[in-house]
Amino acid sequence: MKLVFFDDYKLGVLNKDETRVIDMSLTLEELPRVGPGDYMCRLIEKWSGYKSRLQTAMLDMSGVPIEDVQLRAPIPKPGKILCMAANYLENGTLKEARPINGFLKNPSSVIGDGDTIEIPPEDADIFHHEAELGLVIGKKARNISEDEAYNYVFGYTNFIDVSARGLGPKGSDVFLQSKSYHTFAPMGPYLVTADEVPNPQDTNVKLWVNGGLNQDYSTSDMGHSIPKTIAWLSSITTLNPGDVIALGTNHQGLGSLQDGDVVERETPGLGKLTVKVSEPKKRTWDRGVDQAMADRMRG
Amino acid sequence: MKLVMYNNYQLGLYQDDKVYNLSESLTEINAPTPQDMINAVIADFEGTYRARILEIAEKVQPIPMDQVHLRPPLPRPGKIVAMAGNYFENGALSEAKPLNGFLKSPESVIGEGETVVLPAGHQAAVFHHEAELGVVIGKTGVNVSEKDAYNHIFGYVNFNDVSARGLHPTSFLWMKSHDTFGPMGPYLVTADEIADAQNLQVRLWVNGEIRQDYNTSDMGHKIPKMIEWLSSIVQLDPGDLIASGTNHQGLGPIQNGDVMEMEIAGLGKITVNVSDELNREWHRGRDIDIADWVAGRTDEPPAWAKR
C-alpha cells in the first residue's frame, strides 16, 4: 500500500494502478492526533484497526488524479530521524564495514515532493545530496535482536540526507551543523508498506541533479545490514511508530547542490521524489560527481 | 508558576507543597499524549492558560505533594538540543570554545525517583553525570536574534545530560542518547520566576557528596547567543528543551546503586537512582582528568579519550 499526504495534509492511499489518490479523511476522522506532524505516526501506531479499510479503499474507482494534488511529505515531523553514518562498502571497495555509527537528524527538517531545499548562508565547504533508503518503524522497539528486526519495519520511503561539509569545530562530532538544517530532509513522494518491498537489502537507489545521474547504487552494498542497524539503534534509544531510519549513503556519486538545481530521487516501487534547491548567495561548486569525496571514502 | 506531571501523566500546578490537577479541567485541549498536553499549555500560556490555571486552582482540591508520583514535566520533548563544551570551566578558559551542539534522543527523559540504567550492551569507559540548566522553549522560532531570545523562553528545569565516554567511533548519539540518560524535573518553572537565568547556582550530589557546584554565569555562549545559533539551524518549537551545557569541573563516574541529586536555585531538587546489571566499578568522587583536560590545564586527554 502507498500512503500519501496531499493538499492541506489530507491522508490518502493510492489506488491499485497508482493513478489516483483516494482521500481517507472520513475513515480516519476518529484517529487521535494533534495535526499533520503526528498524523501518520498515530495511524502507524493503530495500523491494525485501519489496515483493511484502507486496503478496500484502494479498489475504489473514485479519487483524484495524482497529478491534480499537491503531495506532501508522508511523515512531516517524525518522532525521531536516526541516520546511519558511512554505512556502505563504497561499491565493495571496503573489505569490511566501518565501525557502526549514527546520529540524530532534526525531525523538523522534513520536506516533501515539490518542496525546496533552502541552502543556509553558512560558509560550508560544499553542500551535498546523499540519496538514502528511508525505513519507517512500525511498532515500539527496544533492544531488538537482528532476527526479529524486520517485524518492526512498517515501510520504506525515498530519503535525501542533505549535508553541509566543513562546519563546526574540527575533530568534533558536528552532525548537528552538517545535517540538521531546516529543509535538509526531503522525503517521499509517499510511504510504501513493507509488504511491497520484497528485498530492501537488494534494491536500487538513484539520484539525479538536473537530469544527470549522480548516485546509482544497490542497498546490497550496505555495511551494517538493515537488521543490524535496527538492533544497534534500538539498543541505544527506543524506536517508536513513525520514526525514520535513514540507512546511510554510498559516497560514490555525491555531488553539490546549488541555486536552481532540480533533484530527483527514485527507488523501484517507492516512486520518484523531486525537490528544488534555493541558494540566495548563488555560490557555485563543481558540477557532477564529487570525485575527491568519492576517493576519500573508498577503501 | 511551577508545572508538574504526575501519576498517570496528569498535568498539575505545584504550589505550597500541593499539587492541583489541571488535566481534568483542561478538557478542551486535544492531547493524544502527555507531551501534547504540556505543549498546548506552553504554546498559549500568556494568552490563555496562565489565567485558566490560576482559575482552576481556586476550584480544585489539591493533593499533598508527597502523595503524588512525579513524572518528568516534559515526558517526551519534540527535540532536545544540547550544547557541547559550553562553560569557561570556572573561568579557566580565556574564551568560549567554538559553538557546538547535538540532538539528544527525546526518549531518554526520566523523572523524579526514576533510575538511570547503564546499558549492559555498551562497554563505555565510564559513565558521567552532567548537571545542566534546561531551557524550555515557549514559542516557535527560526533565526531568532539574541535580542529577542528571552521572548522565546517559557521556563527552566533541572536537566542531567548523562554521558557514556569512550565508545568508538565517538559520536554524540552513542554518548548521550541512551534510554534513561535524561533525568529532568521535578517541575518546570516559568521564566518569570527566575530573575537571572545567567546567575544560578547548579549543584549535583552523588550519594550525598557534592560533585558539581557551579554558576551559570560561567557559561561560554550565553543563553541568547545559544538560542540565536541553534535557531539558525533548527526550528525551535514550544516544549522543546535546550540543555545549556555543563561545567566539567566536578563530573564524576556513576555506578550501580548510586543516588544522584541535582538542584538549581529556584528549580527544586530532583533525585534519581543508578543501576547497572554488570556492576561495573570506577573510582568514587570527581574525575580530575576530564576536569583538567577540558579546562586546558593539561594537553593529556583522559585515558578513555585515547582508547
Image (tube, coloured by chain):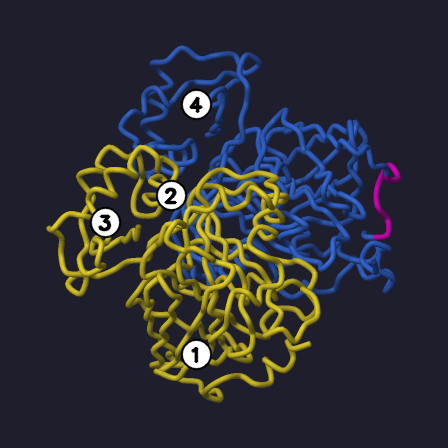
Chain colours: A yellow, B blue
Give residue A257's mark: 1
Q: Name which residue type carries label 4.
A: Gln
Classed neighbour count for the residue bearing mark 3: other residues with Cα under 10 Å, few (<14), some (14–19), many (≥20): many
How crowded pointer 1 is (Cα within 10 Å; few <14, some 14-19, many 20+) is rated as many
Return the residue nearer the eye: A145 or B143: A145
The tag earlier along the polypeptide, 2 or 3, is 3
Q: Is mark 3 on a helix, strand or loop?
A: strand
Say which residue label 3 marks: A12
Tag 3: residue type? Gly
Chain bearing tag 4 is B
**Which amino acid type is shown beneath numbered disc 1?**
Leu
Q: State the residue lying farthest toward the front.
A: A198
Per the rendered image, the range of residues in magenta is B282-289
Q: Check disc 2 and report the residue beneath it.
A: A41
* Label 1 residue SS: loop
Same chain, labels 3 and 4 = no
